[in-house]
Image (spheres, rainbow, N blue to C red):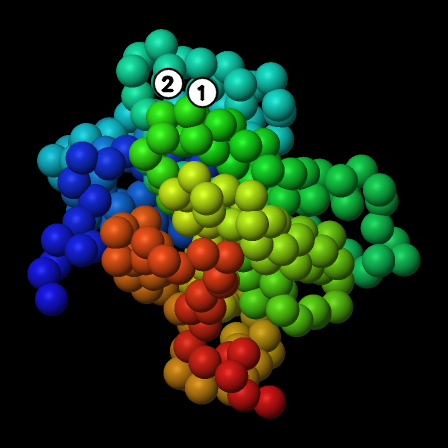
C-alpha cells in the first residue's frame, strides 16, 4: 500500500487549542505528514511561539489567536483566512478545559464555561469550516476531540462529561448532514494522557496508581500517540469513514 494514502501534502489544517498539549502534538503530526498548519489559542504570544517552533522545524505554519467560544471572533478569524486565500481542508476541534467540582456545588457559570469551550466551540468552528468546504465543493475533514467521558462518567466532572458526550453525537450529526458534500467528520477519544491539564492527577499517587491499574497498557498515554489516528482521519485513507470515534486509551474502555 502506498504511503501516499496518508499524505497530507497540499492540505491546510486548522487545529484549535494547539499552542501546547494534545493540540500541539496533533498539529506537529499533521505538519510532518505534509499539511500546512494554522495554530490557534487565546494567548497570542504562546500561539506565536508554538507556530515559530514548527516553522523552525521546516513546516509551513501560522498562528491565529481567537476565542473559539465567541461566534463573532470565529467569523472574524475565518474572514482573515478568506482574505489571505487560506482554505481550511482539515479542521481539528481540540480546544478544551477541565473543571472538577461535585454537581451539587457547581455554579452554572462554570457549567456553561466548560460546555461552551468543549462543545459549543466545535459547533461554531465546525460550522464555519464546513460552510466553506461545501461552497468549494472539494470535501474536507473534521476531527473532533472527545474523551473516555464520551462513553463513561466519573464523579466531579459532570460538565466535561456532558460536553464530551455531546462531542460524540455532534460528530455523528456532522456526518449525517455533511457526508453528501464529501466531508468526513470523526472523533478521537484520548485516554488518560500526560498533559499539563492532567498534571495534578499525574502527581496524585492514588490517582496515578488507579490509571495504571485500570489501563491494560499499565501506563498513561503520550500526546504524540494521538498522531496516528489524527493523520488517518485527516487523510484520504479515511474517505469512507464517517461519524466514528476512535479511542486511543491503552485499552481502558475494553475491560471491566
Task: Farthest residue to the right: give it.
Answer: 104
Q: In percent of the image, x 65 and y 59: which residue is there?
A: 165
x and y, in percent, of residue 211 in the image: 53, 78
Above or below, comparing residue 51 to residue 96 in the picture: above
Residue 238's spot in the image, x, y percent? 32, 57
Q: Pick whichever, 28 or 80, lies toward us.
A: 80
Q: Which quadrant is home to the N terminus?
A: bottom left
**Is 146 or 103 nearer to us in this picture?**
146
Quadrant location, the C terminus: bottom right
Number of residues whose C-alpha sits closer than 10 Å to that of mark 2, classed few (under 14), some (14–19) or many (20 or more)? some
- What x and y, as percent, mark residue 181? 43, 39
Packing grade of label 1 (10 A; few <14, some 14-19, many >=20) is some
Q: Residue at x 41, y 43 (%)?
A: 183
- Check residue 81 in the rendering and tell me which mark sits there, or answer none: 2
Q: Secondary structure at mark 2?
A: helix
Distance of label 1 from label 2 (alpha carbons): 5 Å
Q: Residue at x 80, y 38 (%)?
A: 109
Looking at the image, residue 93 sits to the left or right of residue 148; the answer is left
In the image: residue 235, left or right of residue 123: left
Q: 36 above or below 201?
A: above
Q: Is residue 131 above or below residue 21?
A: above
Residue found at the far bottom of this picture = 256
Which residue is tagged 1?
78
**Which x, y percent locates residue 123?**
59, 38
Q: Residue furthest front?
A: 180
Based on the displayed image, in which of its 4 quarters is residue 121 positioned?
A: top right
Question: From what the image shows, is residue 12 above or below residue 242?
Answer: above
Q: Is residue 48 visible?
A: no
Residue sitting nearer the eye, 7 or 223: 7
Amino acid at each position: 500500500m502506498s504511503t501516499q494514502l496518508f499524505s497530507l501534502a497540499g492540505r491546510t489544517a486548522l487545529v484549535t487549542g494547539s499552542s501546547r498539549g494534545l493540540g500541539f502534538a496533533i498539529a506537529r503530526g499533521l505538519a510532518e505528514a505534509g499539511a500546512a498548519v494554522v495554530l490557534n489559542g487565546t494567548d497570542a504570544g504562546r500561539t506565536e511561539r508554538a507556530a515559530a517552533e514548527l516553522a523552525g522545524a521546516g513546516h509551513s505554519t501560522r498562528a491565529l489567536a481567537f476565542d473559539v467560544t465567541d461566534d463573532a471572533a470565529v467569523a472574524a478569524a475565518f474572514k482573515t483566512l478568506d482574505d489571505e486565500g487560506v482554505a481550511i481542508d482539515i479542521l481539528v476541534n481540540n480546544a478544551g478545559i477541565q473543571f472538577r467540582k461535585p454537581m451539587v456545588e457547581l455554579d452554572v457559570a462554570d457549567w456553561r464555561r466548560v460546555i461552551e469551550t468543549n462543545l459549543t466551540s466545535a459547533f461554531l468552528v465546525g460550522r464555519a469550516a464546513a460552510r466553506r468546504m461545501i461552497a468549494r465543493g472539494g470535501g474536507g475533514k473534521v476531527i473532533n476531540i472527545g474523551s473516555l467521558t464520551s462513553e463513561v462518567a466519573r464523579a466531579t466532572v459532570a460538565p466535561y462529561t456532558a460536553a464530551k458526550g455531546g462531542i460524540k453525537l455532534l460528530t455523528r450529526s456532522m456526518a449525517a448532514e455533511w457526508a453528501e458534500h464529501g466531508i468526513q467528520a470523526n472523533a478521537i477519544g484520548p485516554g488518560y494522557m500526560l498533559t499539563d491539564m492532567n498534571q495534578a492527577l499525574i502527581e496524585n499517587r492514588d490517582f496515578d496508581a488507579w490509571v495504571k491499574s485500570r489501563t491494560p497498557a499499565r501506563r498513561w498515554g503520550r500526546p504524540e500517540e494521538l498522531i496516528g489516528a489524527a493523520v488517518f482521519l485527516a487523510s484520504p485513507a479515511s474517505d469512507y469513514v464517517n461519524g466514528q470515534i476512535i479511542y486511543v486509551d491503552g485499552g481502558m474502555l475494553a475491560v471491566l
